[in-house]
Amino acid sequence: PLPVLAVVGRPNVGKSTLVNRILGRREAVVEDTPGVTRDRVSYPGEWAGREFTLVDTGGWEVDVAGIESKVAEQAEVAVELADAVIFVVDSTVGATSTDERVVELLRRSGKPVILCANKVDGPSGEADAAYLWALGLGEPHPVSALHGRGTGDLLDAAMKVL
Ligand code: GDP
Ligand code: MG
């Protein structure tokens, strides 16, 4: 079976946009409304001659009721099934308390984590990305999933641990 790379993070940070960018086509559903991707969705991915299964998730809100906790469960299952995780943070917002809770869960999972500082659309966003060193997940990779900036370096890093 192919190695599994899961993309997790809070709703609206750009996970589905990143998945589409990695796939090179618009397949994952991108929405301006948070929480649209309710379920885990798997796609065949390829980078630098390596094939893998790419999993988009519905976002991860810890300790929230109803449908959102279902979404959190899905993300948690995705991490369990994954060989490596791309954790996406919105660098224009910074790390929220939810992000910090997710970091704890990721750390407990023992899975390799690649930190994606998304929405760095230009050089001025690089400083925002650097703040994410504080999460203790190693180097934040500045990315614009929307424009494709930095996604090659992100995937190179992912392939090293996948
Ligand atoms: P998800 O809920 O994490 O899957 O997030 P989506 O991929 O659905 O994106 C949520 C919103 O953020 C959409 O309006 C996207 O166009 C926007 N977005 C995603 N990536 C970027 C980015 O790199 N830069 C900017 N400026 N917006 C982005
Ligand atoms: Mg989505």
Image (cartoon, helix red, strand yellow):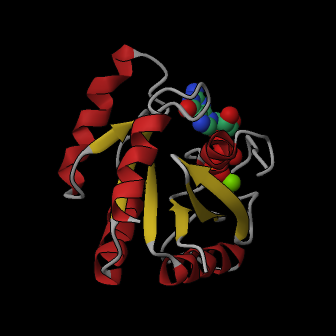
**Residue 80 pos. (x, y %):** 49, 84
**Residue 139 pos. (x, y %):** 24, 46
**Residue 56 pos. (x, y %):** 65, 61
**Residue 110 pos. (x, y %):** 30, 80
Quadrant including the N terminus: bottom right
Residue at x 70% of width, y 61% of height: 44
Residue 119, compared with residue 75, is above or below; it is above
Residue 14 located left or right of residue 115: right
Residue at x 81% of width, y 49% of height: 27
Residue 67, compared with residue 90, is above or below; it is below
Q: Judge by depth and name the residue closer to the eye, 61 or 126.
A: 126
- Count of numbered labels shown in the rendering: 0
Q: Point out the residue furthest to the front here.
A: 49
Residue 26 located left or right of residue 148: right
Residue 113, compared with residue 121, is above or below; it is below
Specify the quarter for ligand 2. Answer: bottom right
Residue at x 64% of width, y 49% of height: 19
Residue 77 visible in image? yes
Quadrant including the C terminus: bottom left
Residue 119, compared with residue 140, is above or below; it is above
Residue 38 located left or right of residue 59: right
Residue 160 located left or right of residue 64: left
Q: Judge by depth and name the residue closer to the eye, 104 or 28.
A: 28
Quadrant of res 57:
bottom right
Q: Judge by depth and name the residue closer to the eye, 139 or 162.
A: 162
Residue 96 visible in image? no
Q: Judge by depth and name the residue closer to the eye, 45 or 126.
A: 45
